[in-house]
Image (spheres, grey):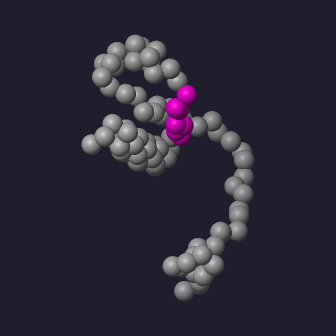
Amino acid sequence: MPDWRRDFVAAHDTGCAAENIALAAIALGLGSCFVKAFSEVALKQILKIPDHMRIQIMIAIGYPEPTNAKSVKREPEPIFLNQFGHELNREG
């Protein structure tokens, strides 16, 4: 497999895993935030990660700050069936 393809697949797999981690955090009452802006060299040194490994993403997980914000109800966006413009009837 070419390097570019392997890197693309690794990034895709990492995104899928990160999303599952975020969903699990929500189920546990936690919040999460994906972090991609970091120095890979510095992070590898701090965490003692071997040079042959790549860091794709970091995920910060913790308890969210309590808030009194109210949920905003929005009209649902249309769902199209088989083709754009052929809106699915949501009532059945």
Q: Residue furthest front?
A: 2
Residue 71 image position (x, y, % from top left): 69, 55
- Would you place residue 28 above or below residue 43 in this image? below
* 59 sits left or right of 77 in the view: left
Main SS, magenta region, reads: strand
Residue 17 position, x and y percent, is 38, 44
Q: Is residue 21 left or right of residue 89?
A: left
* Residue 23 magenta-highlighted: no
Q: Residue furthest bottom?
A: 92
User: Residue 65, image x and y in percent?
Assistant: 63, 36
Is 35 one of the magenta-colored residues? Answer: yes
Front one among 22 and 47: 47
Q: Quadrant of residue 90?
A: bottom right
Image: magenta residue range: 31-37
Residue at image coords 72%, 45%: 68
The answer to whether residue 21 shows anywhere in this view is: no
Judge whether 50 appears above or below 55 on screen: above
Is 41 drawn above or below residue 90 in the view shown?
above
Q: Which residue does the image show at 30% across and 19% down from the upper left?
A: 50
Q: Quadrant of residue 83?
A: bottom right
> Looking at the picture, does residue 47 appear above or below residue 17?
above
